[in-house]
Amino acid sequence: MSPAGSGAVMSSPCRTVRSVRARCGGSAETGCRVEVRAFGSRGARDAATDEMALDGWLHWGNGPGGLPAAGTAADGIPACFRGPYRPS
């Protein structure tokens, strides 16, 4: 495992976690990967979570209206879309 804050990424093929398999199409042969990342601070972790949420909303088309463009860095995501998100 990588030391906290190193920014290293560890990957593992989908094997035993059923919820991950369901999202991967049901088998490890789909090429799905699970990524584990360590962050040096809570702020860095929260920023990455906000970026991941934005990417997910845009990819699946289920986010709130008015989202910024894909690839927007956390500091460019309006506060109303940063975690914890509470739909109004």
Image (spheres, rainbow, N blue to C red):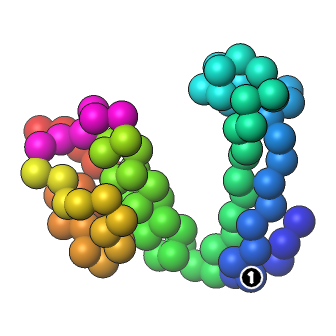
Residue 8 relative to residue 43: left or right: right
Q: Nearer the viewer, residue 71 or 35?
A: 71
Q: How far across and down, in percent of the image, does residue 64 sit?
A: 18, 41
Query: Residue 85: horizontal and vertical position, in percent?
Result: 28, 48
Image quarter (top left, top right, bottom left or bottom right) of the C terminus: top left
| Start-end of magenta stretch | 60-65
User: Residue placed at 27% from the left, 33% from the top?
Assistant: 62
Q: Give the answer, above or below, for where 7 lies relative to 24.
A: below
Q: Residue at x 66, y 28 (%)?
A: 24
Say if 18 sits above or below 56 in the image.
above
In terms of image quadrants, where is residue 37? Answer: bottom right
Q: Main secondary structure of the magenta part?
A: loop
**Can residue 79 be spotted in the picture?**
no
> On the rendered image, what quadrant is the N terminus found in?
bottom right
75 to 71, vertically: above or below: below
Q: Can residue 16 be seen in this snapshot? A: yes
Q: Quadrant of residue 38?
A: bottom right
Q: Which residue is mark 1?
A: 6
Residue 76: x percent and y percent? 25, 75
The magenta stretch spans residue 61: yes
Residue 41 vs residue 60, the one in the foreground: 60
Residue 19 among those drawn in magenta: no
Give 29 or 64, whichever is nearer the viewer.
29
- Give the residue type that dot 1 points to: Ser
Q: Residues within 10 Å of mark 1 (few under 14, many from 20)?
A: few
16 or 61: nearer the eye? 61
For the point 39% across and 52% down, the residue is: 55
In the rendered picture of this protein, how many numbered marks are placed on residues? 1
Residue at screen point 73% across, 29% down: 30
Kindly state the secondary structure of the residue where label 1 is placed. loop
Percent x, y of residue 58? 31, 45
Q: Residue furthest front?
A: 30
